[in-house]
Amino acid sequence: AFLRLTGWRIEGKPPEAPQFVLIGAPHTTNWDMVYLLAVAWALQIDVSWVGKQEIFRRPFGGIMRRLGGIPVRRDRSQSMVEQMAAAFAATDRLALVLAPEGTRSAAEYWRSGFYHIGRTAGVPIATGFVDYERKVAGFGPVITLSEDIGADMDRLREFYGPIVGRRPGNQGPIRLREEAG
């Protein structure tokens, strides 16, 4: 209803895999998550997201978990990648939403956590998008990661290249620091 009322439509099919990392890009405004979650709810997809453990304390901890939040301990020797891989191993169904840009401002590189979580957990990367120019949000291809990070990123660049964020000037290049060598 929200999408229809705001003049938006859904494009693409949700992933069929029971487990996947769902990346949302471009991320140029807080509204991106609102639209992406509206798509997930409209298609009845339970999504999870990551937050620092402190926001899961009383009085809001229960609400955060019911909204799909997964607490991450930043003080542990175990990395976020390892913690999220363990979360995938602990359940049969998990759609973990991450914004690879890591910020709403233009960044020189995407954060590679989504890629390493996918590789470590052995789950595909689903592409979610919000295209403000066309007023369309939804899903693109599901990518099974290979051993070639450059080729995998080329597939993401091909898909996300034409998509326009709400603030196009805040869109940075689609690349990982690991690609720079």
Image: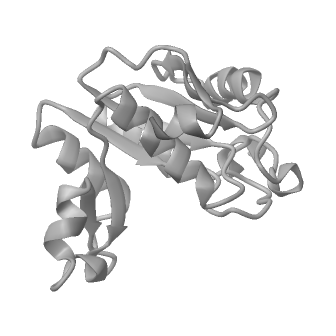
**Which image quadrant is residue 136 in?**
top right
Who is closer to the viewer here, 171 or 3? Answer: 3
Q: Residue at x 46, y 33 (%)?
A: 39
Image quadrant containing the N terminus? top left
Who is closer to the viewer here, 6 or 146? Answer: 6
Q: Position of residue 91 (x, y in %)?
A: 11, 38
Q: Residue at x 67, y 20 (%)?
A: 155
Query: Does residue 77 sit above or below 16 in this rendering?
Result: below
Q: Position of residue 95 (x, y in %)?
A: 31, 37
Quick check: can you spot residue 99?
Answer: no
Q: Position of residue 43 (x, y in %)?
A: 36, 25
Task: Using residue 138 as the reference point, say whether residue 144 is left or right of it.
Answer: left
Q: Residue at x 21, y 40 (%)?
A: 88
Q: Residue at x 19, y 48 (%)?
A: 87
Image quadrant containing the C terminus? top right
Who is closer to the viewer here, 53 or 28? Answer: 28
Quick check: can you spot residue 83?
Answer: yes
Total marks placed: 0
**Which image quadrant is residue 135 in?**
top right
